[in-house]
Amino acid sequence: MATLTREQIRKTIFDVFGAIAPEVEPDTIDPGKPLRDQIDLDSMDFLNVIIRLHEILKIDIPESDYAQLATLDSTVDYLSRRKGI
Amino acid sequence: MPSLGADMEAGTLVEWMVKPGDAVKRGQVVAVVETQKGAIEVEIWETGIVDRLVVEKGRKVPVGEVLALLRAPGEAPPAAAPARARISPSARQLAEELGIDIRSVQSAEPGGVISRADVERAASARKAAPAPAAAAKPAEADWHAQMRKAIAVAMSRSKREIPHYYLATDIDVTAVTDWLAAENTKRGVAERLLPVVPLMKAVALALHEVPELNGSWTEGAFRPSAAVHLGMAIAMRGGGLVAPAMHDADRKTLDGLMADLRDLTTRVRGGRLRSSEMSDPTITLSSLGEQGVEGVFGVIYPPQVAIVGLGKVTERAWVHQGTVAVRKVMTATLSGDHRVSDGHRGGLYLAALNRLLQDPGKL
């Protein structure tokens, strides 16, 4: 994880979403638009995304930070910051 | 073939998980059936020994058809000699003409002689459900069309047979929302509770005060249920929904309910539900707040007699302790069956729900 890059974090996010919402096609995601407007996610799906990101990246994501994971770009920014990238 | 909901007419047996001679226990999964709502694991309701598998893999059979025969524990297997079925000569001839395997024909009278009428009934059932080939999972588009058809059948029946009444009330949910936020800060990511979980518990507990909303309308009469099996409406990926039972929802802890919800959601979207989960709900809860819906006026899923709807939590100007304040408010609705209850009792239910949500620490 020491050599983790923003691009790897982006790929991790796609992998996690792909496992939870298999219909997701990464190329069709607009990185600046809210993910929940583009992917059919309910709160259970979103919680599962948070849990998987927590498991893979070893980051505890408090509920108060959920708003920072609204878009793909903001999620990459948030996770990169938390990983010190 | 068990009925796994008001919309189910037939199912295709896709897998046997037991074989003749196996000992089975009540509640054990013995088969997998493909329905319009996906593959369902069929549980058995008696303990015993599997004597014979009557329906072979791949056959589509109507609800009510015998799938297998069971012997009581300790009961000797039937002697091999009387393989000859008890069937009238003319019924045997008719079965031969129609190509019906007489081993699959049941007499209308338990233990009775198979008659021509029994053979004709078996032939009709086969005609209604002819296709062993249907064992294969239908193409995606076809499957969705079938699901919509199944939902339409149940909802049409509901609107035709159930005299609905509808009630709505706005509930100040600030206390439960704040309580949950505080509770979740103490928990690790994987142990957090979703906002709907305390609402589910309150919906279940409030039924203790108005039990006539919990049960089924069967054979012209209301059958109250002592247990609260909450049917939780869960959307399927790509459309459609199912509302499997969260058993004994009123007696479970919030963590227990969260675990059940996680398990059911996972299996609705990628695994298999069990027959008891499909057939046991005593009331349904539909929560559409996440989709931005403010009020849900549900259609009762027969044979149930009520459905509760929860809308989104919004911040509103609200009189609280004598002053106007910004509070978190949610619209809760109840659709009830007038054959069993009325608006007065329904109103008492929503009042009980409101009261329970003001004291979330006790849920």
Image (cartoon, helix red, strand yellow):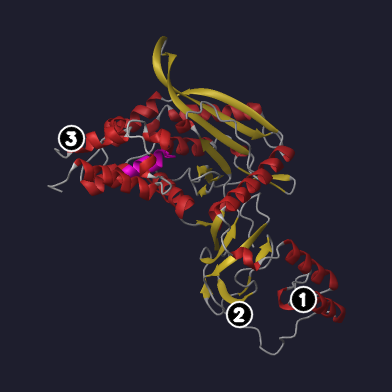
Chain ID, mark 2: B
Q: Residue furthest front?
A: A27
Span colored in magenta: A39-49
Which residue in the structure is indicated by mark 1? B99
- N-terminal label among 1 and 2: 2
Residue B292 visible (yes or no)? yes
Which residue in the structure is indicated by mark 2? B75
Q: Are marks 2 and 3 in contact (CB under 8 Å)?
A: no
Calculate the distance from the C-alpha at mark 1 to the C-alpha at mark 2.
33 Å
- The answer to whether dots 3 and 1 both sit on one chain is no
Verify whether residue A47 appears in magenta.
Answer: yes
Occupied quadrant, residue B97:
bottom right
Binning the other alpha carbons within 10 Å of mark 2 as few (below 14), some (14 to 19) or many (20 upward) gives few
Occupied quadrant, residue B322:
top left
Q: Secondary structure at mark 3?
A: helix
In the drawing, does residue B151 fall left or right of residue B85? left
Q: Secondary structure at mark 2?
A: loop
Q: Secondary structure at mark 1?
A: loop
Q: Which one is closest to the eye, mark 1 or mark 2?
A: 1
Q: Residue at x 56, y 41 (%)?
A: B284
What is the three-letter code of the residue carrying label 1? Gly
What is the three-letter code of the residue carrying label 2? Glu
- The answer to whether dots 2 and 3 both sit on one chain is no
Q: Position of residue B137 (x, y in %)?
A: 56, 60
Which residue in the structure is indicated by mark 3? A81
